[in-house]
Image (cartoon, grey):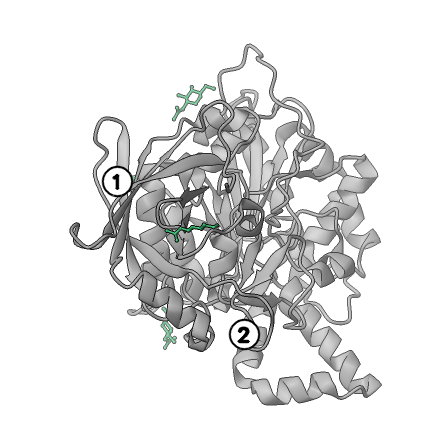
Amino acid sequence: MKDTLRDPLKGWRTSFPAALRSSIIKLKLPLAFCALVSISLLLYSAFPTRPAPNFHNKPNPVSRLHVATAAPPTNLSHIVFGIAGSASSWNLRRHYSALWWRPNVTRGHAWLDAEPPLNESSPSASSPPPHRVSADTSRFKYTSTYGSRSAVRIARIIKESFELLEAAAEEEKKKQDDVRWFVMGDDDTVFFLENLVTVLAKYDHEQMYYVGANSESVEQDVIHSYDMAYGGGGFAVSYPLARELVRVLDGCIDRYASFYGSDQKVQGCMTEIGIPLTKELGFHQMDIRGNPYGLLAAHPVAPLVSLHHLDYLRPIFPDTTRIQALQKLMESYARDPSRALQRSFCHDLRRNWTVSVSWGYTVQLYPSLVTAKRLDATIQTFKTWRTWKESPFTFNTRPAAAKSGSNAREVPPVLYFLDSVGENVGGESLTTYRRHVAGLDEGKVRNTGEQQAGDRVLAGVRAVHVAAATMDPKTWTMAPRRQCCEVIDGGDGADGGVVRVKVRGCNPFESATLP
Ligand SMILES: *[C@@H]1O[C@H](CO)[C@@H](O)[C@H](O)[C@H]1NC(C)=O
Ligand SMILES: *[C@@H]1O[C@H](CO)[C@@H](O)[C@H](O)[C@H]1NC(C)=O
Ligand SMILES: *[C@@H]1O[C@H](CO)[C@@H](O)[C@H](O)[C@H]1NC(C)=O
Ligand SMILES: *[C@@H]1O[C@H](CO)[C@@H](O)[C@H](O)[C@H]1NC(C)=O
């Protein structure tokens, strides 16, 4: 969320050799340590705001469901977006906003520090989303030694958005009565709009709500806060809360002058008002480094609402650019928004195979029987955000492959990635997933004997076809439950190497239990 800050950092990151970085990490010199801490803080506080996928799937203790009121259900036109950007990053990042912004439908603006430079090779000034230049913030205090003053400007986006709306209503001599939520995000946040609406519609917009999620990396939560909605993952503030927040926000900005990030300053105000964060597990700050595969393949049982930090991670599909990969995910998302990334596990007891579906993204096929408990844990294909360590995260992980010499006998799965999304037929979608030959971590994990054995067993399985009925968004107002699946047939040779799987609601007393 820190505009001017991000780009310098980005330059730093890419020009700073990994070897040097790791040698600094190893040096226990206090100075080097301080420098490292500040730089790292810059790095990821630069992208605060992302919801931690909480793989425990604990029911949200503070979720208060919208109890039927007279108000019509919340839809997209009730939401005003405030996107934090900067003139220097706008032309490099606006393609992320363009992925989800719907011209003349989505309301709100990207807020920049200045008019962005335009040239022939940059997209036209009028391409979405529309932008505005933020008000001057030089009168405010900012004393964080490792951050950027742009945090002040970005913290005030919600206030400027609110005031813009009130001014427009004033001009038309009417009461502002159609905006229910303000949703904040970064210029590198991708929102999944139907699911954002599904999630916000659960809450009574006439009450004061602050909805979002914290960081996946525990080190981040320790430094910045466990109780804060990380700005890059995006967060939503209901209108009545926004009204109170904008009254005190400028004071908070000065009172919390030492806080690094805009999202921390906003949360400082929230604690003064006394409004806790309502955590929603579909907001993703993505405070991780490396390959996001494992995290996306183990999404919590909650609608996918946002993704962030995609410039800092490998493309979510192999052998493609970041944007193409996101467009691919958007294809399946568009077919069945509520089901995007939702998981199902099933076992084929005839052959002792295990199937794990992450709908619209990937299928994992194991040539062995794997427990649901194990499948549920996130395969760790990434490191922590700030220090690039193996742990800890705010959810359970399992290694991408058995370390050589370890006793773990688990055969790594063979991976299939979304290939095509068929037309809906009779309310059912057909998604196909194609075998991917390299491993989870760029081939490194594929060299074990176990892996080769797994590959041999499943060598004939070229693709997996998954049929699933379109999921009703109302499913998300009910108690969460992972759906069930069954292996219909295939993979025996006579079928062109296609395993067919059906994903469906579970029957009474059905569970993914091994014999
Ligand atoms: C959203 O709901 C409002 C009622 O609050 C309605 O007037 C409007 O047409 C709806 N918009 C869409 C796009 O459904
Ligand atoms: C959005 O609305 C403006 C003015 O009403 C119109 O000129 C423009 O073509 C519209 N854009 C799209 C993509 O519909
Ligand atoms: C023009 O914009 C592109 C980004 O769209 C940027 O990469 C390039 O450096 C810009 N050129 C100049 C001369 O500013
Ligand atoms: C499947 O595993 C069970 C033990 O869990 C074993 O008894 C059985 O023979 C295996 N079946 C096949 C086809 O490998």
Report x, y in % for residue 154: 62, 54
Q: Is residue 3 visible?
A: no
Q: Is residue 199 visible?
A: yes
Q: Is mark 2 within 8 Å of ligand 3?
A: no
Instruction: Please determine whether, in this image, residue 459 is positioned above or below residue 303.
Output: below
Instruction: Please determine whether, in this image, residue 22 is positioned above or below residue 463.
Output: below
Q: Amino acid at mark 2?
A: Lys
Residue visible at 47% across and 26% down?
A: 475
Report x, y in % for residue 359: 39, 44
User: Residue beneath label 2, please?
Assistant: 10
Q: Quadrant of residue 90?
A: bottom left
Q: Amino acid at mark 1?
A: Leu
Q: Quadrant of residue 176?
A: top right
The quadrant of the image that shows the N terminus is bottom right
Report x, y in % for residue 7: 54, 71
Q: Of marks 2 and 1, which one's residue comes earlier in the chain?
A: 2
Q: Residues within 10 Å of mark 2 (few under 14, many from 20)?
A: some
Camera-nearest residue between 343 and 45: 343
Closer to viewer: mark 2 or mark 1: 1
User: Which residue ends up furthest to the top in the rendered image?
Assistant: 70
Residue visible at 73% across and 86% down?
A: 26
Q: Quadrant of residue 270?
A: top right
User: Residue beneath label 1, please?
Assistant: 430
Report x, y in % for residue 473: 44, 28
Could you tell whether 303 is left or right of 159 in the image? Answer: left
Disc 2 is placed on an element classified as helix
Disc 1 is placed on an element classified as strand
Instruction: Please determine whether, in this image, residue 507 is positioned above or below residue 375.
Output: above
Mark carried by residue 482: none
The quarter of the image that holds ligand 3 is bottom left
How far apart marks 2 and 1 lie (CA) works out to 40 Å
